């Protein structure tokens, strides 16, 4: 069970991932969590998120937002970005809606990547669904609902073990990162 809680990679920010390099590796679909992965919890799409989705659309990616939040929140964010669909009240970490997202995008576990900020919902669910999982540091980790804040303490303990696992584990798949000159896409 412990390994299913570890991400395939852990990076500072969604906005540092080189999605063009991932495209060249054969990835065609991306599933994103929204809150604290793309924008602060509850925030609308900002210029950075809008530019990212425009870039992903230009690269030809299929993109789905997968959130445990209610539809008004997810739909509003989705309407502000280009080329994405969404699934709300996703029931993460259950893998059903990860698989539903891939079905909608016409992708498979081999060519889909998941990016999220929480271990117990995002990473665990992606791993259960067989999708490459990337954990990002939350944008504003202490401006969340209390149950998420409490989980952050347990996640911190898990990430201590992940540091050792990352050094010796065989399933770590580092995602390519943008060079500093390209970070402002």
Image (cartoon, rainbow, N blue to C red):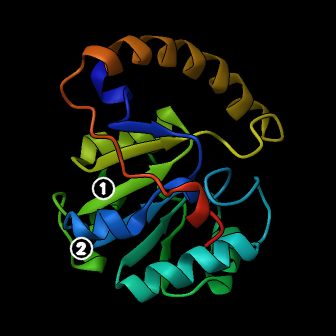
What mark, if any, has residue 54 been given in the picture?
Answer: none
Residue lying furthest right in this view? Answer: 143
Quarter holding residue 136? top right
Q: Position of residue 48 (x, y in %)?
A: 70, 71
Front-lying residue, 155 or 73 = 155
What mark, if any, has residue 103 been given in the picture?
Answer: 2
In the depicted structure, whether residue 79 falls above or below residue 117: below
Q: Is residue 34 visible?
A: yes
In the depicted structure, whether residue 111 falls above or below residue 51: above
Which of pointers 2 and 1 indicates the residue nearer the eye?
Answer: 2
Q: Residue at x 33, y 64 (%)?
A: 21
Marked residue nearer the N-terminal end (2 or 1): 1
Left or right side of 159 for 39: right
What mark, if any, has residue 96 been given in the picture?
Answer: 1
Q: Residue at x 32, y 37 (%)?
A: 8
Q: Position of residue 1 (x, y in %)?
A: 28, 20
Q: Residue at x 39, y 54 (%)?
A: 114
Tell me the SS state at disc 2: helix
Left or right side of 107 for 54: right
Q: Is residue 94 visible?
A: no
Q: How many marks?
A: 2
Mark 1 neighbour density, 10 Å: few (under 14) some (14–19) many (20 or more):
some
Mark 2 neighbour density, 10 Å: few (under 14) some (14–19) many (20 or more):
few
Residue lying furthest front in this view? Answer: 181
Q: Position of residue 185 (x, y in %)?
A: 61, 73
Left or right side of 133 for 65: right
Q: Position of residue 110 (x, y in %)?
A: 16, 58
Tell me the SS state at disc 1: helix
């Amino acid at each position: 069970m412990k390994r299913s809680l570890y991400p395939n990679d852990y990076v500072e920010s969604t906005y540092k991932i080189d999605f063009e390099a991932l495209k060249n590796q054969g990835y065609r679909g991306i599933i994103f969590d929204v809150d604290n992965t793309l924008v602060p919890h509850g925030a609308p799409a900002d210029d950075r998120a809008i530019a990212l989705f425009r870039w992903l659309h230009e690269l030809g990616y299929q993109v789905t937002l997968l959130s445990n939040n209610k539809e008004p929140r997810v739909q509003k964010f989705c309407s502000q970005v280009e080329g994405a669909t969404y699934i709300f009240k996703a029931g993460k970490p259950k893998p059903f809606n990860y698989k539903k997202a891939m079905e909608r995008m016409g992708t498979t576990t081999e060519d889909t990547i998941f990016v999220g900020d929480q271990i117990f919902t995002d990473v665990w669910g992606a791993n259960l669904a067989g999708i490459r999982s990337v954990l990002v540091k939350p944008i504003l980790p202490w401006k969340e609902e209390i149950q998420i804040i409490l989980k952050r303490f347990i996640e911190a303990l898990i990430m201590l073990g992940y540091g050792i696992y990352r050094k010796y584990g065989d399933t770590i798949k580092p995602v390519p990162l943008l060079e500093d000159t390209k970070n402002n896409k």
